């Protein structure tokens, strides 16, 4: 059954990218860097090769903040208080088929939160040290953000 969901998500994602390309759409997304100590939560989706931060597409009538909270709840089962999120950056990601406007937020936890994934869209979620090689495979905006955090953290 897991193979079915992986296939379904990959086909749906590729289809969306083609639609965005032909419509000339510029989709919007919201992502959240979740921190516990000096570790960041990275998720592996069933439809992308590299890990990413929890997040995704923004619905039409949602604010960036609402989308970020919804995506984190859907992907890793955490209900975030919007007041605990800090907006970090906004940029445009040059994807394969579409330019996507990305809003990036961060949240910090004193204790490791319980992460729950569906094993359909999200197949794994793990905490990584900022020096871990997986952080080098992220989208350029996320890589730059983590590099900034790495450079500015006390040694």
Image (cartoon, rainbow, N blue to C red):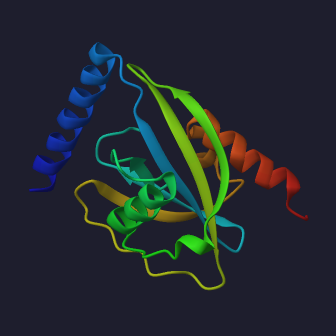
- 15 relative position to 101: left or right: left
- Residue beneath the point at 36% across and 23% down: 25
On screen, residue 21 above or below 4: above
* Residue at the right extreme, as displayed: 155
On screen, residue 78 above or below 93: below
On screen, residue 104 above or below 95: below
* Residue at the front extreme, as displayed: 61
State the residue in front, 69 or 154: 69
* On-image quarter of the C terminus: bottom right
- Residue beneath the point at 66% across and 41% down: 143
On screen, residue 140 above or below 145: above
- Residue beneath the point at 47% across and 58% down: 68
Instruction: Give how far across and how far down residue 79 sits, in percent.
Output: 42, 76
- Residue beneath the point at 70% across and 74% down: 37
- 29 relative position to 61: left or right: right
Instruction: Give how far across and how far down residue 86 sits, in percent.
Output: 66, 62
Instruction: Give how far across and how far down residue 36 sits, in percent.
Output: 64, 74
Instruction: Give how far across and how far down residue 14 sits, in percent.
Output: 25, 28
Asked which quadrant contains residue 141, the reply is top right
**Could you tell me if residue 119 is visible in this image?**
yes
State the residue in front, 83 or 155: 83
State the residue in front, 135 or 55: 55
* On-image quarter of the N terminus: bottom left
- 154 relative position to 45: left or right: right
Asked which quadrant contains residue 111, the reply is bottom right
């Amino acid at each position: 059954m897991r193979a079915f969901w992986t296939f379904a998500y990959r086909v749906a994602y590729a289809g969306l990218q083609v639609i965005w390309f032909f419509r000339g759409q510029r989709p919007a997304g919201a992502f959240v860097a979740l921190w516990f100590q000096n570790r960041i939560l990275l998720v592996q989706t069933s439809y992308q090769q590299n890990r990413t931060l929890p997040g995704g597409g923004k619905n039409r009538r949602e604010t960036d903040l609402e989308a970020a909270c919804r995506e984190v709840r859907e992907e890793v089962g955490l209900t975030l208080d919007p007041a605990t999120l800090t907006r970090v950056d906004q940029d445009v990601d040059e994807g394969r088929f579409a330019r996507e406007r990305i809003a990036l937020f961060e949240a910090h936890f004193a204790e490791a939160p319980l992460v729950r994934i569906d094993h359909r869209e999200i197949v794994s979620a793990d905490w990584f040290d900022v020096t871990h090689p997986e952080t080098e495979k992220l989208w350029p905006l996320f890589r730059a953000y983590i590099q900034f955090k790495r450079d500015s953290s006390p040694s």
